[in-house]
Each structure stands twice: as C-alpha cells, then as structure tokens.
Image: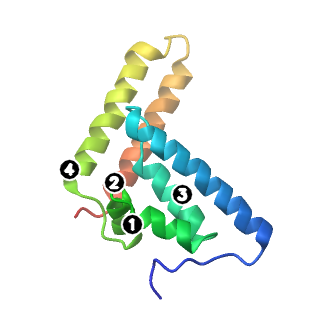
C-alpha cells in the first residue's frame, strides 16, 4: 500500500474533526510563509497527517503543492530532509531561542528560559534524527 493512500476514518464525526484540525494547521502553515520564525513545513506535515485520516483530496493537495509538497512527500516516504533545510532549521531554532533567552524572557522567569531551551533541544534532536537527503 502506498504511503499516499489516505486511511480515512469510518466515523463521520471523527473525519470532520481531523479535517478541521488539518485546515487549522494549513492556516498556520500559510501564515508561516510570511511570518519569520513560524514554521511552514511542520504545520503542513501535521495537516497532511490530519488529512490522511479525513480526505484524500486535501491530502493530495498538501503533497502536490509546489511550495512545500516535496518536503512533506519526502518525509512521508521516509526519505528525510535536505542538509540545507536541516542547517536552516537549526539556525532558526537556536537563533530565536537565544534571542528569547537573552532578551525576550525576563530574568526572573528562569523556568521559562529552561523550558524554552529544553523545547529547542527536543526539536533539534528530532530534526537530527530525520535522515538527510
């Protein structure tokens, strides 16, 4: 079975829930195209996962989109992500985290600085574990 054949859930309410969640993720992903620091591909991956459970048509739209479809398709097929994309992801993650820790988060919120660092480390580990094209 192809990784691109949607496994649509049988319950109409469950399908509608997945479809709404996917549409919300697409909205965030589209906003991420123009807002620096808001990731596009991550939201489109989540949208693809939601549409995979709700709509073949919307899933096909995500994986065939000319801007981000190839990245989603490569990830779904287990091919990984390009080295340049990984480097850019690491630079953006740590650039924004360092800005937040050093400038954005007040010193008395030390726990927030630690939580931000742990979230960035988790994201870095996840990206590092993805195969490199």
Q: How does the figure colour the protein chain or chains?
A: rainbow
Horizontal and vertical percent for residue 83?
20, 54
Horizontal and vertical percent for residue 7?
60, 78
Looking at the rendered structure, the secondary structure element under dot 4 is helix
Looking at the rendered structure, the secondary structure element under dot 3 is helix
Q: How crowded is the residue under tag 3: few (<14 C-alpha within 10 Å), some, or many (20+)?
A: many
Q: Quadrant of the C terminus?
A: bottom left
Q: Image point 64% across, 76% down: which residue?
A: 8
Task: Give the foreground label among 4 and 1.
Answer: 1
In-image side of 76 versus 109 (left or right): left
Mark 3, residue position: 47
Mark 2, residue position: 67
Horizontal and vertical percent for residue 17?
72, 60
Mark 4, residue position: 84
Looking at the rendered structure, the secondary structure element under dot 2 is loop
Of mark 1 and mark 3, the one earlier in the sequence is: 3
Of mark 3 and mark 4, the one earlier in the sequence is: 3
Looking at the rendered structure, the secondary structure element under dot 1 is helix
Disc 3 from disc 4: Cα separation: 23 Å
Q: Image point 23% across, 57% down: which residue?
A: 82
Image-quadrant location for residue 131: bottom left
Q: Image point 42% across, 42% down: which residue?
A: 39
Residue 77's place in the image compared with 117, above or below, is below
Mark 1, residue position: 64
Image-quadrant location for residue 93: top left
Task: Give the foreground label among 3 and 2.
Answer: 2
Disc 4 to disc 1: CB gap under 8 Å? no
């Amino acid at each position: 079975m192809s990784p691109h054949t949607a496994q649509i859930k049988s319950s109409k309410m469950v399908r509608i829930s997945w479809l709404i969640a996917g549409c919300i993720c697409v909205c965030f992903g589209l906003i991420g195209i123009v807002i620096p620091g808001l990731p596009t591909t991550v939201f489109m991956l989540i949208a693809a996962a939601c549409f995979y459970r709700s709509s073949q048509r919307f899933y096909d739209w995500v994986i065939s989109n000319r801007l981000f479809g190839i990245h989603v398709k490569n990830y779904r097929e287990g091919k990984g992500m390009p080295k340049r994309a990984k480097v850019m992801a690491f630079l953006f993650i740590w650039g924004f985290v360092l800005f937040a820790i050093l400038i954005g988060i007040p010193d008395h919120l030390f726990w927030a600085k630690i939580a931000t660092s742990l979230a960035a480390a988790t994201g870095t580990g996840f990206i590092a574990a993805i195969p490199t094209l």
